[in-house]
Image (spheres, grey):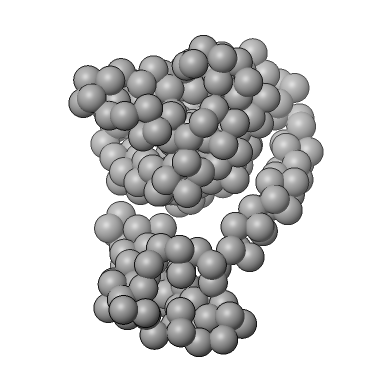
Amino acid sequence: MSGLLSSLDPWAAVAGWSAVTIGFYLVSRQVYRRWPRWWLMPLAVTPALVMLVVLALHETYRDYIGGTGWMIMMLGPATVAFAVPIWEQRALIRSHWPVLALGMVAGSATAIGVSWGMASLLGLDDTLRLSLLPRSISTPFAMEVSADIGGVPDLTAVFVVMTGVLGAALGDLVIAWLPLRSALARGAFLGVGAHGAGTARAHQLGATEGSVAGLVMVLVGLLNVALAPVLAWAVH
């Protein structure tokens, strides 16, 4: 049975799915601003609401992504725009580059190792395993790395969202447990461990934490994209 929106003119379907996605995001963002709870984060609420609409209208993922593909295309310019915070924080990079570099490498290696180990332990197939590996970097970079190593970029995007939401939710507990006394350490921890969602949480802790988290998030993404061929060779 054909879904309601998929039976419309292609441009009408694009307008419909785009309106649904953007509308849910804007509403969930307003809700989160009023009640800042981790389970109300737009990254968690918007996909859940969209999924309910897809099921209610008897649509498929192919129908939905066909109507919102332009948003995926915008990830390219968004990736280029990440150069701005790096330039703005160049003084911070010069001052702390050894510590930042060590943290980025250690965080990326830990995330990839844990993903690979858990996937192997659970007996997941190669497609799922490769799609899981880049889950701890922001979506534009993660989808690029996933495509390079043989994963499914769309599936990787789902894992990225799940990692970000859980990382932001558990970040406060870990920060309270670990001796992270400096704003640099707290920001780097959230930026490496929970990428975009962690950066949003870091901004709530303080301006310095937010700036560091955003910077580290971008640098980790660039590092993983640069090393994607090496990762692809290692896993194959």
Residue 86 image-quadrant placement: top right
Q: In the image, is residue 173 above or below residue 93?
A: below
Residue lying at 63% horizontally and 20% vertically, measured from the top left: 229
Residue 206: x, y in percent?
Answer: 50, 46
Residue 171: x, y in percent?
Answer: 34, 38
Residue lying at 64% horizontally and 53% vertically, measured from the top left: 75
Residue 229 can be seen in this image: yes
Looking at the image, which is closer to me, 117 or 181? Answer: 117
Q: In this view, does 129 lie to the left or right of 173?
A: right
Looking at the image, which is closer to me, 191 or 154? Answer: 154
| Residue extending furthest toward the left | 122
Q: In the image, is residue 151 above or below residue 53?
A: above
Residue 15 can be seen in this image: no
Q: In the image, is residue 110 above or below residue 216?
A: above
How many numbered discs, if any? 0
Looking at the image, which is closer to me, 128 or 46? Answer: 128
Residue 226: x, y in percent?
Answer: 67, 24
Residue lying at 56% horizontally and 14% vertically, measured from the top left: 233
Looking at the image, which is closer to me, 122 or 26? Answer: 122
Residue 67 image-quadrant placement: bottom right
| Residue extending furthest toward the front | 1
Residue lying at 33% horizontally and 67% vertically, measured from the top left: 51
Q: In this view, does 61 lie to the left or right of 90?
A: left
Q: In this view, does 144 lie to the left or right of 112?
A: right
Q: In the picture, which quadrant includes the N terminus?
A: bottom left
Q: Is residue 149 left or right of residue 24?
A: right
Residue 8: x, y in percent?
Answer: 50, 87
Residue 174 image-quadrant placement: top left
